[in-house]
Amino acid sequence: MRPHHVPALCAVAFAALSACADPAPVAPVAPPLPTAASATDEAPLSVSRLYRPTELQFPRGGFDASARRVNDKGVAVGQSGYLYVGPSPYEPGTVQCRVAPAAAIWRQGQVFMLHDVLVQALQMDPCRSWSHATDVNNHGVVVGTVFDDNWDGYSRGFVWSEATGVLAIQEIGTTAMVAITNRGLGVGYNYAEGPKMGERVFGWTQTGGTFEIPGPPRPLFNWELAIDVNDGGVVLGCSDTQVARWDARSIAELTSWICDVHTAAAPGIPEEYFGGGINERGDAVFTATRTTSSTGGESRPFLWPKGAAAPVVAPWQVGGATDVSDRGRLVGWWLVGAARTMAAVTQRGGAPPVALRSTAGGVVSVALGVNRCGDVVGWTQVPGGERKAMLWQIAACDAGGG
């Protein structure tokens, strides 16, 4: 990490951002760890009637879109391929080219291509660059990652809002921003080779810049990766390949499960869908694979309640868990039937898990984010392989604490 990014001011800022009382407890959602006799891999798939599926708008010339997260105001972020038409710092006049992936925002049914703004602000080659947005807080601040072939071979993280414009975040080597809280604490990670080889997690604030958030001490490797962060400053991530929770005060919890963030546990599905989420109470979800006689080698969705010594398998038991709301709603994807078809799934409290219906033509789907109310975003894939960004809007907001 850069030395001038670790002042005492940052530690003070982090403490101020993370000092808060726990929200009201969510309803209990932890099922017992399943046995072979109780596993529901082949259980009939019930479809939720509480949700209305909507395909989010494609941009001009749009293709292959997915929505990653949604805030409590219904603003969703993610990425979409599209036709860029506009200026380039490398060519005169107007250029046209297909770009994918490209950071996108969906507000009130309309798509806004954030990639257009990134191209101009960072003077990128629009036809040799890519970007994706990974999170948005309730103030409309968006974080993500951007790359241009004309750079030094390393991606940058970015922070954007209408008030401040684009801020590029560059640490040593490859840099990515993955999440931002409502209090303005962003987290990301960077990978560097050479004498300081390894992957490290850092925090960011508007006033303090970036500062390292060391993960649990481990003797084997120098590899850490952030997946999500909550307003209390607790990071969900990976420490030497193992799923962990920690914060800047080095209060750490480590599981025995291997992160699936950089694996391909489901053929053809990008690595970004094997992450997870942590809510304001501290309950976390994630996806992991461990080959055993009872689970085989398939991905498993896990719930890790706050204070629990170990995570438990989420109720749908085969697939992945990608996010958890402040009111205890879990979302992810379910591998269903002998064909292992992927279906977007949600579950809350003691209710059984239910699939989220896709729009006409959707053959597989994945849920990636959920807000406090219970609205869900993700994608569905239609015959031919194209993905469409999805919003599943709940009929009535989830009630309860959080």
Image (cartoon, helix red, strand yellow):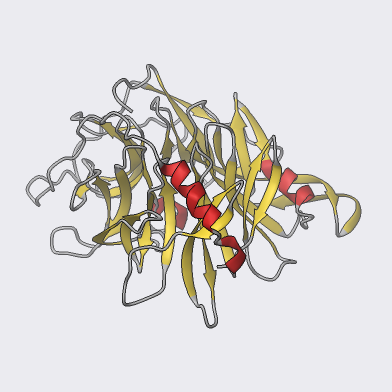
Number of numbered discs visible in the structure rendering: 0
Displayed quadrant of residue 255: bottom left
Residue 365 visible, this angle: no
Place of residue 208 in the rendered image (x, y in percent of width and height, measured from the top left)? 59, 51
In this view of the protein, which residue sits in the foreground, 105 or 9? Answer: 9
In this view of the protein, which residue sits in the foreground, 41 or 304? Answer: 304
Image-based side of 171 in relation to 90, left or right: left
Displayed quadrant of residue 351: top left
- At 29% from the left and 42% from the top, the residue drawn is 283
For the view shown, which residue lies furthest in the right direction? Answer: 92
In this view of the protein, which residue sits in the foreground, 30 or 352? Answer: 30
Image-based side of 122 in relation to 28, left or right: right
Q: Considering only vertical position in the picture, is 228 above or below 90?
A: above
Displayed quadrant of residue 327: top left
Place of residue 149 in the rendered image (x, y in percent of width and height, measured from the top left)? 71, 65
- At 47% from the left and 28% from the top, the residue drawn is 72
Place of residue 26 in the rendered image (x, y in percent of width and height, measured from the top left)? 26, 30
- At 13% from the left and 59% from the top, the residue drawn is 294
For the view shown, which residue lies furthest in the left direction? Answer: 37
- At 20% from the left and 46% from the top, the residue drawn is 41
Residue 65 visible, this angle: yes
Q: Considering only vertical position in the picture, is 395 above or below 155?
A: above
Image-based side of 134 in relation to 373, left or right: right
Q: Which image quadrant: the N terminus? A: bottom right
For the view shown, which residue lies furthest in the bottom direction? Answer: 195
Image-based side of 343 in relation to 109, left or right: left
Q: Which image quadrant: the C terminus? A: top left
